[in-house]
Amino acid sequence: MPSSPFDPLKAKPSTIAAQALRRHETTAERRRITPPIDISTTYERDADNAYSSGYCYGRDDNATIRHGEEVLARLEGGATAALFGSGMAAAITAFLALPRPAHIIVPKVMYWCLRDWLKNDAPGHGLEVSFADMSDLDQLRGALRPGATKMIWIETPSNPLWGITDIAGCTAIAHEAGAIVAADSTVTTPVLTRPIELGVDVVMHSATKYLNGHSDVIAGALVFAKDDAFAAEARRLRKALGAVLSPRDGALLLRGMRTLHLRVAQQCQSAMTLARHFSNHTAIAQVLYPGLETHRGHDLAAKQMHGGFGGMLSVRVKAGEAAAIAAAAQVKLWRRATSLGSVESLIEHRASIEGAGSPCPPDLLRLSTGIEAVEDLIADLESALDAALCAGLAAGIKAG
Ligand SMILES: Cc1ncc(COP(=O)(O)O)c(C=O)c1O
């Protein structure tokens, strides 16, 4: 008996991503393989004054942007998604879409630029912010004010120490108190964790990172579990602020997402190899990576991350801050730059960019693993550490 034809609705996430949902194969142009870029800023009204095309003006949205949103919503298992001109624009829109005044709880350790906004700017927008250690659910319960707390923001693994937050635990606590949960899932990506399946109400991405993956687009995203009033308010604000992603960048992002699964699989594998290797290195005091059994959040990460522990890790250099900066100065293959999640590997002395008030130890180097041969990455970092160590010893001898 011939087998029944393949049902595309049953396709796996990597298939959906690789073919970008094939949404661009409209009935008129069924043979197109690559999504087109819709650069029109405006759309014609029908003679009867309606907009039957579903499009009106480019600041609201556009066909390329909607295409990317549909792919991402499918990958995250959300009802709908909205793309923004940056991750910061997406995140701040999520906060401003809350009915205010609002009390919100956010992590003590999180992406520094957003932490700064929450500390310095959010109160002026009617947001009372409590910072909590999100790895401690009792601390989270203690910070909750039922009725007043409107949102709990989590980031897991969190920048730059890669602490793990119990997503399902947080959502249970939040929902009991009538608050929603938003998760910055930039680092984990929908390949490894789908927070909506664990109860999260809105997933945020700096799509600049893994989703695009090539260091050539600044973009952000919100993915909503439900297409509800909160999602509608976020879209309204995006339109009012003009924070929508540009179609040309949307097309690059769409292309980037088509290789997301392959890139993330390679990055996870290389990060694990790097973590294991440098755990035994004499110049390294500690490797922070949730894939290591020694990491505080390892068991939880193994439960809620599937197929790997991510491409991000940090190393603490035994000889201290100056040696860490010196080691970063010596690399020949790793690129000394901020950001993460791209095909090329990046190294960064994180405290230098986070500045005063950062919880980041001064001896920490943050590593974003790319897709280069891991043997090359190890050899380059090892010789950079050796060179920094030798220079330090020589300086010590001279000073002595
Ligand atoms: C975890 C995380 N969230 C949010 C952002 C902000 O995203 P963007 O730079 O796209 O505005 C970043 C950027 O580094 C990030 O690493």
Image: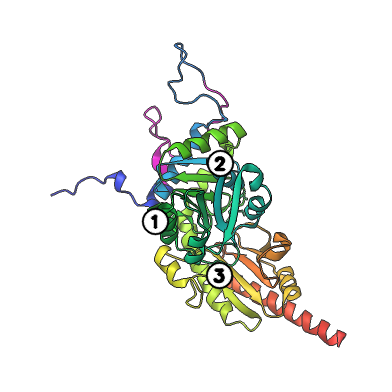
Which residue is painted at 50% across and 70% down in the image? Answer: 290
List x then y, in percent, for residue 239: 57, 32
Which residue is painted at 45% across and 36% down in the image? Answer: 229
* Residue with the mark numbered 2: 100
- SS state under label 2: loop
Residues tagged 1 and 2 counted as in contact (Cβ below 8 A) = no
* Distance CA(mark 1)–CA(mark 2): 26 Å
* Residue with the mark numbered 1: 198
Q: Is residue 360 above or below residue 247?
A: below
- SS state under label 3: helix
Residues tagged 1 and 3 counted as in contact (Cβ below 8 A) = no
390 left or right of 226 in image: right
* Residue with the mark numbered 3: 374
Q: Identify the magenta region.
A: 19-43
Residue farthest toward the right in the current orientation of the protein: 399
Sequence-wise, the earlier of marks 3 and 2 is: 2
